């Protein structure tokens, strides 16, 4: 059973068309907008742009169940939190952890991130590995990066408790903890 404009069980195409590419200027950019109801995050609009001519590609997601500017705080206590906590970070949100010692800030080319806590930690390890190579020869920086990577590895194994904080001025970010751990999730208005 398939309705025209439906995408899978939970999606519906809102718009599809060919537009001018912002990179090459040709009318070869395929644009699609899909309204999607995700069981974890609720209603979303998925945006997809891809140019047949130059290969430019951009995807984005808008979370429709905004709470207004918010701060989301969650304490990661063990492996279950690492592997079963989902993070939806809008392109406008800052994500950080005082205990782990990282901060991911929004920027003009930031994209939405949907991942698990494990996925976030693995990304941090990848970035730290790259930074270690770039700072080769600076023993103090390399030493701090190695300490950071050890904390992240311990966190991946559930041996290092840490807090993740998401500050989103648009309120379009959310975090979904494992079932039964919702009381460990704190959402409050973000005072700007």
Image: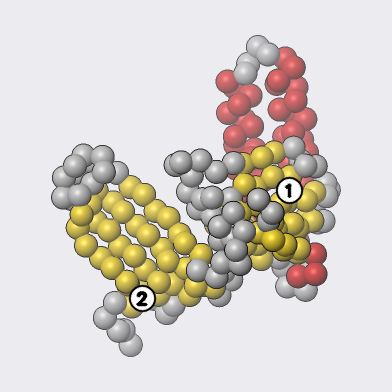
Q: Quadrant of the N terminus?
A: bottom left
Q: How busy is the neighbourhood of tag 1: few (under 14 within 10 Å), some, or many (20 plus)?
A: many
Q: Is residue 119 visible?
A: no
Residue 23, disc: none
Determine whether, in the image, residue 122 is placed left or right of residue 62. Answer: right
The image shows residue 187, relative to residue 150, as above or below, that is below
Tell me what residue is drawn at x 74 percent, y 57 percent: 73
Q: Which mark is residue 12?
A: 2
Helix, strand or loop for disc 1: helix
Q: Position of residue 12 (x, y in %)?
A: 36, 75
Considering depth in this image, is 189 or 174 the residue closer to the camera? 189
Q: CA distance from mark 2 to mark 1?
A: 37 Å
Residue drawn 59% across and 54% down?
A: 169
Q: Which residue is mark 1?
A: 156
**Of 118 and 6, the residue lying toward us:** 6
Question: Which residue sits furthest bottom?
Answer: 1
Q: Is residue 103 left or right of residue 41?
A: right
Q: Quadrant of residue 147?
A: top right
Q: Is residue 192 left or right of residue 49?
A: right
Mark earlier in primary sequence (2, 1): 2
Give whichever of 136, 114 is nearer the camera.
Answer: 114
Q: Position of residue 7 (x, y in %)?
A: 36, 74
Q: Secondary structure at mark 2?
A: strand
Judged by depth in the image, the label closer to the viewer, 2 or 1, is: 2
């Amino acid at each position: 059973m398939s309705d025209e404009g439906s995408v899978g069980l939970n999606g519906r195409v809102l718009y599809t068309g060919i537009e001018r590419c912002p990179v090459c200027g040709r009318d070869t950019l395929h644009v699609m907008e899909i309204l999607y109801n995700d069981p974890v995050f609720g209603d979303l609009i998925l945006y997809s742009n891809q140019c047949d001519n130059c290969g430019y590609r951009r995807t984005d997601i808008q979370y429709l169940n905004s709470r207004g500017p918010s701060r989301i705080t969650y304490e990661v206590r063990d492996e279950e939190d690492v592997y079963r906590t989902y993070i939806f970070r809008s392109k406008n949100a800052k994500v950080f952890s005082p205990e782990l010692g990282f901060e991911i800030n929004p920027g003009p080319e930031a994209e939405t991130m949907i991942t698990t806590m494990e996925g976030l930690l693995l990304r941090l390890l990848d970035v730290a590995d790259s930074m270690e190579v770039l700072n080769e020869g600076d023993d103090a920086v390399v030493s701090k990066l190695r300490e950071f990577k050890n904390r992240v590895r311990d966190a991946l194994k559930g041996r290092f408790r840490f807090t993740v904080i998401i500050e989103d001025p648009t309120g379009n970010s959310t975090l979904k903890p494992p079932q039964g751990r919702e009381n460990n999730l704190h959402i409050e208005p973000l005072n700007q």
